[in-house]
Image (cartoon, grey):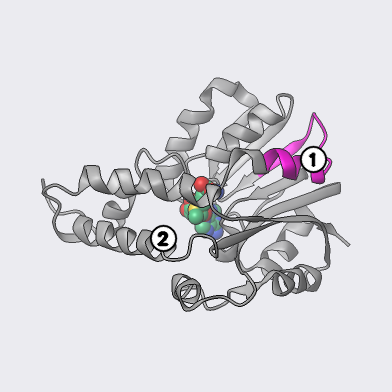
Amino acid sequence: MSELTPDEAFLTLYTDLAREGPGAPADLGWALSVAATPEQARIADAGCGSGADTVVLAKERPRAQIEAVDKVAHFVEAARRRVAPFGSRVWVRQGDMADLHGPYDLIWCAGALYFLGVTEGLRLWRKALAPGGAVAFSEPCLLPRPSAAARAFWAEYPQITDVAGIRARVAEAGYRVLGEQMQIGDAWEAYYIPMARRIEKLRPGSTGALAAALDEAEREIARWKAAPSEIAYALMVVAPA
Ligand SMILES: C[S@@+](CC[C@H](N)C(=O)[O-])C[C@H]1O[C@@H](n2cnc3c(N)ncnc32)[C@H](O)[C@@H]1O
């Protein structure tokens, strides 16, 4: 097999993974209920990856119109395959989630708003929300008195803050918090355990960029395993103030 580029190696690692970041199906039910998202809602899944949450949204709101957006063609194709059974009410668009039009009753964004910045992204999305609409997003969050292991896990995200800091970024964007909960443990296992299996499958004979991508993913999993009860996303449901 010819050598893969780093991008190809990254996508090879992620092929067939159920999701591309931490998350748990039950959290969507919680967010839809906190946001009071109506049955016939218009929903966006921003940074949908391969569509794990798009599918849950489609099941939770069987009469909703759902638009999933991701910038990576590989993920868009995978998400399209997964949502095909729901027909034309669920569609996947390759594009920039900074450019959402709506109007949406809910913008769901799991593990992706940090690409835009919490304040910047929420400001951009305000015009895409229908009256009474809300945004639900998950964001890296430091728990009180983080250990060295927790800080090491987040070393590549220097903007990380605690839940008070996230609330401040939400307020700065002109939003208020409707509800919040921490994603610790299960949501991360749902991401890292299948990834560890995928690494095991790809490892034999891997070289070059693929071996490097597997090594890096393995190091990330090891950093998470060093402090699993401290590594958290805050799942925030927010609406214009
Ligand atoms: C950590 S993954 C999370 C994927 C998915 N929400 C999940 O939880 O499985 C982040 C996703 O955001 C996408 N992404 C990053 N920046 C983006 C942008 N500006 N517009 C659209 N998608 C973006 C990436 O391609 C990736 O699929």
Circle 1 SS class: helix
Q: Nearer the viewer, residue 93 or 145?
A: 145
Residue 163 included in the magenta stretch of the image: no
Residue 29 included in the magenta stretch of the image: yes
Q: Which residue type does callout 1 highlight? A: Ser
Residue underneath mark 2: 225
Residue 89: give x, y in percent of width and height.
66, 27
Q: Residue at x 46, y 29 (%)?
A: 81
Q: Nearer the viewer, residue 51 or 161?
A: 161
Mark 1 near ligand 1 (CB under 8 Å)? no
Q: Quadrant of the N terminus?
A: top left
What's the magenta region?
28-44
Residue 59: give x, y in percent of width and height.
65, 27
**Numbered mark located on residue 69 in the image:** none
Residue underneath mark 1: 33
Q: Relative to 167, is 21 above or below?
A: above
Q: Which residue type does callout 2 highlight? A: Lys
Of circles 1 and 2, the one toward us is 2
Mark 2, residues whose alpha carbon is within 10 Å: few (<14), some, or many (≥20)? some
Q: Residue at x 64, y 30 (%)?
A: 58
Q: Are marks 1 and 2 in contact (CB under 8 Å)?
A: no
